Each structure stands twice: as C-alpha cells, then as structure tokens.
Image (cartoon, coloured by chain):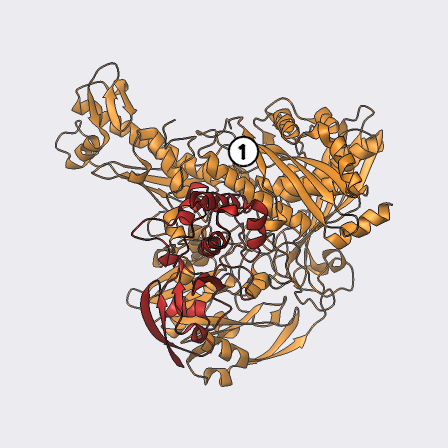
Amino acid sequence: MGIEGIGARVARKEDKRFLTGKGRYTDDMSVPGMKYAIFVRSPHAHAKIKSIDAMAAKAMPGVIDVLDGKQLTADGIGNLICGWMIHSKDGSPMKMGAWRPLADQTVRYVGDAVAVVVADSVNEARDAAEAVLVDYEPLPVVTDPVKALADGQPQLHPEAPNNLIFDWELGDATATDAAIAAAAHVTEVKIVNNRLSPNAMEPRAALGIYDSGDDHYTCYTTSQNPHLARLVMSAFYNVAPENKLRVIAPDVGGGFGSKIYIYPEEIVCLWASKRTGVPVKWTCDRTEAFMTDAHGRDHVSTVKMAFDSANKITALKVDTIANLGAYMSLFSSCVPTYLYATLLSGQYDIPAIHANVRTVYTNTAPVDAYRGAGRPEATYLLERTMETAARELGLSPAELRRINFIRSFPHQTPVIMNYDAGDYEASLSAAMAAADWDGIAARKAEAERRGMKRGIGMSCYIEACGLAPSSAVGSLGAGVGLWESAEVRVNAVGTIEVMTGSHSHGQGHETTFAQLVADRFGVPIDSVNIVHGDTDKVQMGMGTYGSRSGAVGMSAVAKALDKVEAKAKKIAAHLMEADESDIVIENGELKVAGTDKSVPWFQMSLAAYTAHNLPAGMEPGLKEGAFYDPSNFTFPAGCYICEVEVDPDTGQTEIVQFVAADDFGNIINPMIVEGQVHGGLAQGIGQALLEGVHYDPDNGQLLTASYQDYAMPRADDLPSFKVSTSNTPCPNNPLGVKGCGEAGAIGSPPALINAITDAIGNNALTMPATPEKVWAAAHAAN
Amino acid sequence: MAKITMTVNGRQVSGTCDDRTLLVHFIRENLGLTGTHVGCETSQCGACVIHMDGLSVKSCSILAVQAAGSSITTIEGLAKDGELHPVQAAFKAHHGLQCGFCTPGMVMTAVDMIARHGSKLDEATVRAELEGNICRCTGYHNIVKAILAAATEMGGVRQAAE
C-alpha cells in the first residue's frame, strides 16, 4: 500500500468544505424566482376529508397558490409504491393500499399531507397553511400492530382486511416443530424491538424546478439514491419522463436509511413548480421529520429455541408481527422479511428454522429501513435468546456460543443465506481479551462494595450486506437490480474523474474511492475527483444503503479501473516499443519491467488524447465504464461486549466500557471504518438505552415529536469505544471488502441489554432501558 | 420589518427582515452564509451555534433584531488566510465529522469551550459541555478526541474566533 492507497488512514478530502461552512446541502440551494412550500398536514391519525377550503389562505400576503390532492389526482400524479413484492404463504400478493402524495379522501396518520401552500417566504407560507380550512370527520384509531390484527378494529385500507398486509413464512415448519418437540431444553422468550426515528441531522428538503422553455424538471433532494428517485418518479408517479428529469442529491447530512425512499414532498415540489411556474423549495422542520420520516424497527416476536442434551441448538421458531404504519413505503416489505428472517441463523449452525412474519397497517407513520434494516431485529432476537438460554442452561454466554458456532465455510443456512467466509471464534476471543472478560467477577465485587450493580453482556452478530445479486433479489420480489455502475475518465493531463452510482452522505466516498484509484495508478488522491449524486453526470446507479458502497460501488470502480489499466498499458507499450504484458504501473509511471524505460502517467494520458501515436486501430481517449453485479451478499460479523454499572437507587445505567471486534474483510481506510463503527454503536446504544417513538394509543397523536421528547444520545450518554477488526477477506468481490456501515447498530443493542439484565439479575427488560424500567426490573428481581 | 446592522466575520453588514426573523435565518438567507445550519426548532441540536460578541450562542434562539449592533462570527469566519483554525484542523485530523451537517455548530462550540478551559480540558468536561450539540454520525468518540487534541495543540492559549 502507498501512503494514500488501500489500507492508509488518509484524512478526508471532503472535510475542508464541511469544516469551513462550504458544504452545500439542499436547503442551501437558491435559484432565481424561488418560492417556498409549507405542507398542510393532518392533525388526526385517521379521518375522512370532507372538504378543503383554501379561499382565505390564497388571499393572504405573499401566497402564490394552495394546491390539494384533488388537483394532484386530476393532473394524473400516481400513488407512492412499495417496490418489493412479497407473497403470503397462501400465495396471495401483499395488500398494498393507496398512498396519495396529497391525501384526497382519507388521512391515516398524524402528519399525512393534505395540501401545500406556495408563498414568497417560509413565514408567509406557514401563516397561510394555518388558514387552510380542512373539514375532517375523525375515524377510530389503532396504533398497536398486535391489536390492529384483531377483529373489530379500525380498518386502514379496504384492500387489507384486519389490516394484514401479508402473512409470510420462511423455513421448514414441520422439521422445526419436530425438533422442538424432541428437545432436551427449549428457551422461550418474547422480544419487542422498539420503534425508532432515524434523525439524520439534516432534515429532509426538496427543491423542484420546472423549466417551461425546455419542458424540463430539476429536483434537488436529500436522497441516498438520486437515480432511483428519478426512475421511480418517472416510471410510477408520472411526475416527468426520465429524460426530462434531473435529480441532484448534493451534500446530504446523514441518511441512515431515512433518505432512501421517495416521499410525497419531492413529488409535490416538482408538480407544484409546474403548476405555479416558479421553483418551489420545501425544508422539513424537526417536528415534521419526527412525524413523516419513515420510522424503523417496531417488531413484536415470540421465539422458541430448542437444544439437545449437548447444548447444541436443534431448532429456532420465530413468530413476528411487524408494524409498517399507515402506508407501505418503498422498501418496507423487504425489511421484516428477506432482510430479517434470512439472518435468523446468526453465527450458529441451526439445522431447522421457521419464521412467520405478519405485517400490519396502523395509524402511524410509515416504517421502512433504518440503519441495519432487518438485521438488527434478527440479531437482537437471536442474541437475547442466546443469553437467556445460557442462563437457563447454566453455561457462560461465550461457552454456549462457542458450542454452536459455524466453523466451516461456505455454510448454507436453512433460511436462504450461504455464508462465504468468517472466523467467529477470532472475533469472540479478541473482544473477550479486550474487555478483560475474565476479570469481571472482581469488578462486580468492587462495584458491589460501592453499592452499584455491575454487569457484562455480549452479542455475536452476523449481517448480510453489499446488496445484492440482482438475479437473487429479483427472484425474491425486488423491483430493481442491485448492481452498481462506475465510469472512470482519465483526462488528457492525467487527472482522473470517477463517476459512481453510489452516494455519499457522510461515509467519505470522496476519499476512499480516490484511495482505490491512487493505489492502482500511484497518482495522488488530490488528482482524483469522485463525482456522484447527479443523474445528469452519472448515467445510472442504485445509491447507498445496506452497506453496499464498498462491496458493490467500489467493486464497480475496480472493474472500470481494470479496463482503464488495460488500455493504458497498451498505449504505454506502444510508446516504449515494448510488449504490453511487460508493462507495470508504479508510483505514477508506466514502466517496462526489468528495464529503466518508463513513461509518466500524464504522458500516457496525453498520448491517448493527442492520438498522434496510438497503436494501430486504437480509439482515442481514455474513458471506461463498468456495471458490477455481485455474486453474493457479503457477511460481516463480530462480537460486541458491553459492561455497565447500574445504580440500584435510581435505575441509571452507565456504560463503563464498550468493546467491538468486527470482521470487515479487507479495509480501504481504517480511520473511516472506525468512524462508521462508532456511529453505528451510538445508534444501537441509543435504541437500547434512550430512544423510542411513542404514539398515544387512543388517538394516534405522536408523543415524541421533538428533541425535547425523543431522547437522542448525547456526548455524555456514551463512552469512548474500544474497536478492533479482524480481516477475513470476502471471496465474492474483487476487493475482498465487506460492509461496515451498519454493524455497530446491529450488534450493540443486545450486548447492552444483556449487560443490564446481568447486572440487575432480571432477564425481563425491554428497550429502551430507561432508568424507570431498570429500577423497576432491579427491584422486581430482589 | 426592521433594518439592522451588525458586524459579521469582521465585515459590517446590514439588511432588512421581519421582526420575527431568527438570527440563523438572517445569517443564512439575508447574508447567504449557509454554513450555519438548522437541525431542529427547539434549540436542542446546536447545528446553528455561532459566536456573538465572543460567546457561543444558538442562533435559532435569538431574533435577528436582538443581534443588531453585535459582532458575529460564523463558521465561515473561522479559518484565516486559507489556514484552518486549530479546532477545524483537529476535527479533520481526528475524523471528528462524517456528514458534516452538525460540524459547524460543533466547531463553534468547541472553540468557545477551549477558550474558556484552555489545555485543562478533560474528557468528562468535553462530553458534559457538548450537551447542547447533537451528532448522529460519529458517536462523539472522535469529536471528543479532536477537541481534546485541539486544546492540547493550542497549549491553553486563548484562541477564540474573534
């Protein structure tokens, strides 16, 4: 590796603009004539819209127009869709109710948009939105997914009787039931995975610009995948034809999944721009974000895990009810199914697994992928169950895991996944050593003398990331292929531009992708520019989510670099009258191996463009592209250990140490990987200790609608983390990389809850483990 | 409407705004200095922290008219002559940012924190005083590291933005 190449801790190229206030986020964009949109949103969780009267609002100062759902319908704008078709076990397709960008008949959650005001200023638009008179007929409300399935409950969509979207299964029910019946021991637990709000610090925003001169639309938006936004808006929502729609996702202030989907607002801003003849910008405020950003998690599960007399797992049976909220968001159906149940084997050799998942409509905000998306839910379920089983069986948590680890690869699980490589023992041992696991008894005793309860907990997670082989996801119901594209343009002076369909919203692609190029050609990373996030610059892409940028996005770049390298060697060989098989590229030069002959990189690239002296028949220029479709998911895995001290008088939990030992395969930039782990850990710890979205069950009002009500992790809630990696290369992509973006959020919640339950001696504790809950559980145990 | 004048990043500026305009919106929209961000509407997140007359202030919690006549420093005014301020440099060196959205507020808070505590800053104090700034990307680990490193680097010398 070079000082800027693969494996180097290169400081980020993009940091200077962020640190000096020169980042350009969607709300920073201004264009001549731009006006401002404010949405009129339902205060009811469920109601019929009897009428909308915008007369008074339209007469207010600065107001350009007020548009509602009837006008949107009249203009032929389509319904929002869910892009992954899941079938119930009886073979019937999932029941997708209509989701209008502006509700025209019924509202189904607090915050459902019913109209939009466009005015000269935000304040004038806000004033006018207050003056739009909407006559609602309130309807009964249900927010609890278990309750929503029962007879006689409020019905959200006529397509879905009893609010059931699908009743899906995976695995072998017969074999699983038989193994449970024959088991020496069965551990049964109920698992609730709490509902979360993603809370990217940059609120969502959209700027829609319709140019009547060219009949062309431009949309600046806070998106993790602008190409998919363009595809969906043109193919399904009838906003604009794909060739007349440019989507730009400039700097994006965090996503965590919440900016994958297409929301009503960007559709409405584009449509409203055409209707009003002015560019229309909307920027979400935080309360609006809590109400309308897709939430994450929200599972209720019952679990049975069967063991034989040697403490080997013989079967796992899972029954899950997943709340998808009022409408099916773009990826909502795949999260509690193929991203969840396929990971229920964890790191363990489990011969029989059966999962049943029922998804349910409720009068709450839509639920979709949030950092980890399905894998945190699977890991939490499995690792809480393993901990419970270890306690019931009288084994140490590490011992029970070791007995059941998968130790040979590839390994075919009973739930689709084929694990390609891994060494789970290595992560476990590394984490236990770093955490001084063996010294815990002494530390507990010392804490006891101070009147504190100390506990330790572990979690051994596996995830599938690097989404994903297109044929595989196609066979499972995905509406798109999950390849990635790249184009590498070498300029005449030897500088390089890389166009990628991946999108960076904090992950540092401008640095890591450039490191890949620097490593290959020996050029400085400052001579490499990474171009992303603009459908006019990059032909096509699938964006960034599911930890796919390294494994899929960078692999596409590597494939394009292969083609550039091959042509560059041909040119260099011709210039030096050598055989192309003798050309090596080192330190920015193309050399004839074993001689002192060389041409600098820039001289070769200039030759490509002057084209005075190229091999016979060679096309001038040096620009190559590649589409890369992975052959499998990649499977990062690791072991997390958390140690806590609980104050029995207050129920307050302090994390005294947190250790993460991950296997991410080959690593491009260890500094950036560690940062991704830190961030993931903070979100997982936030879920376990602090965060939770709460609705009033009687009226569906959102009770956690600001940072005063929703407990976001702050600096003094968290410790400094001890992180390390082992590196079993992924055999399925050219770089041997796995994904690191979600691991922290996947592995940490069970480690923390296992630690608290160890400390207080009571296994019954749900997330978030607030002081009140911990105090009650600690006292119930005594 | 009010006409106000203030000094921003060493330059006298004036503008006209609604009486209800918050300072953060005046800075972003009237002055076009978009480095100062809005991440919430309850003064909890700290993405909008600027310095007003030498003290860190959440610019969403003050009206623009209240800032008339004051001296304001925003993130755009921190680097001098193309050289990053030591706190900015430390954030870069220690990977104290990811998406960059909370970063301007974090840096402005950190500069004030170091100016008040000098090199005596410790981790517990940094974590406690970051209470008003939320980051969703970094887990704070490297932000804390960067601030401590900057405090050491600056050797306890008061090097505020002003």
Q: Is residue A375 visible?
A: no
Which amino acid lies under the numbered mark 1 shown in the image of this protein?
Thr
Q: Which chain is red?
A: B
Q: Which residue is mark 1?
A: A634
Which quadrant, please, contains the N terminus of chain A? Answer: top left
Residue B161 position, x and y percent, is 40, 57
Residue B40 position, x and y percent, is 53, 63
- Residue most toward the left? A612
Q: In screen coordinates, is A388 left or right of A31?
A: right
The chain under label 1 reads: A
Asked which secondary structure carries label 1, the reply is: loop
Q: In screen coordinates, is A214 left or right of A230?
A: left
* Rendering quarter of residue A444: top right
Number of numbered tags placed on the structure image: 1
Drawing shade for chain A: orange
Question: Which of the pair A434/A404 is nearer the observer?
Answer: A434
Q: Is residue A779 above or below residue A215?
A: above
Residue A705 position, x and y percent, is 62, 64
